[in-house]
Image (cartoon, grey):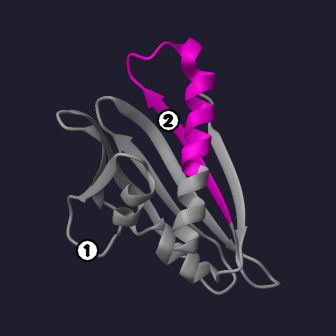
């Protein structure tokens, strides 16, 4: 699947945007039929593992992720978190980069390579469009709630 790219500006300072966008439990609340299960003790760091479980009843699939890069933003430098997807049905990676803006606020770059095992490549454009909509909605809600 092609990489999904979302760029979003916010008036929130980079540190606040970082805090909101790396609160993994809140991610599950923004994606329909999903909850997040944190598998490692806080605080988040390289090696943190969590699972986004999506579904209803016994019909679920897990998107298990591991934090492999954890660099919170500093005064004038961007922050970057990279997640590697470690599950069986969902593979790929995700990155959230938060760049402080000189005029205040921050610019968020969300990049995601989402691969669903067993899904024909012919459906990649449909999956990419749906994922872009879901992730854009989640990003917006995480920053404003």
How many other residues sit within 10 Å of disc 2, few (<14), some (14-19) or many (≥20)? many
In reply to whether residue 117 is colored magenta, the answer given is yes
- Name the foreground residue: 20 vs 88: 20
Who's the residue at 46% across and 29% down the image?
115
- Image coordinates of residue 76 in percent, x first then y, are 70, 83
Question: Is 5 placed left or right of 117 in the picture?
Answer: right
- Image coordinates of residue 94 in percent, x first then y, are 50, 48
- Name the foreground residue: 123 vs 44: 123
In reply to whether residue 65 is colored magenta, the answer given is no
Quadrant (top left/top right/bottom left/bottom right) for the N terminus: top right
Disc number for residue 57: none
- Image coordinates of residue 79 in percent, x first then y, are 58, 71
Q: Which of disc 1 and disc 2 is earlier in sequence?
A: 1
Asked if the residue under mark 1 is in contact with the one under mark 2, i.e. CB atoms within 8 Å, the reply is no
Q: Which residue is mark 1?
A: 42
Who's the residue at 17% across and 33% down the image?
58
Classify mark 2: helix, strand or loop. strand
Who's the residue at 48% across and 55% down the image?
82
Classify mark 1: helix, strand or loop. loop
Q: Residue furthest left?
A: 58
Disc number for residue 114: 2
Question: Is 135 placed left or right of 5 in the picture?
Answer: left
The Cα–Cα distance between marks 2 and 1, rounded to whole angstroms, is: 26 Å
How many other residues sit within 10 Å of disc 1, few (<14), some (14-19) or many (≥20)? few
- Name the foreground residue: 51 vs 69: 51
Question: Is 130 placed left or right of 29 in the picture?
Answer: right
Q: Point out the stretch of residues depicted in magenta.
A: 108-135
Who's the residue at 40% across and 69% down the image?
23
């Amino acid at each position: 699947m092609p990489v999904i790219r979302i760029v979003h500006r916010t008036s929130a300072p980079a540190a606040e945007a970082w805090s909101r966008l790396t609160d993994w439990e809140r991610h599950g609340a923004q994606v329909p039929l999903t909850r997040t299960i944190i598998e490692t003790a806080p605080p988040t760091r390289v090696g943190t593992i969590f699972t986004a479980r999506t579904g209803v009843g016994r019909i679920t699939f897990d998107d298990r992720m591991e934090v492999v890069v954890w660099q919170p933003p500093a005064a004038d430098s961007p922050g970057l978190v990279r997640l590697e997807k470690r599950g069986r049905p969902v593979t790929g990676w995700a990155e959230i980069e938060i760049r402080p803006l000189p005029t205040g606020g921050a610019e968020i770059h969300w990049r995601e390579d989402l691969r669903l095992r067993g899904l024909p490549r012919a459906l990649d454009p449909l999956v990419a469009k749906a994922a872009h909509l879901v992730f854009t909605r989640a990003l917006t809600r995480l920053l404003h709630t």
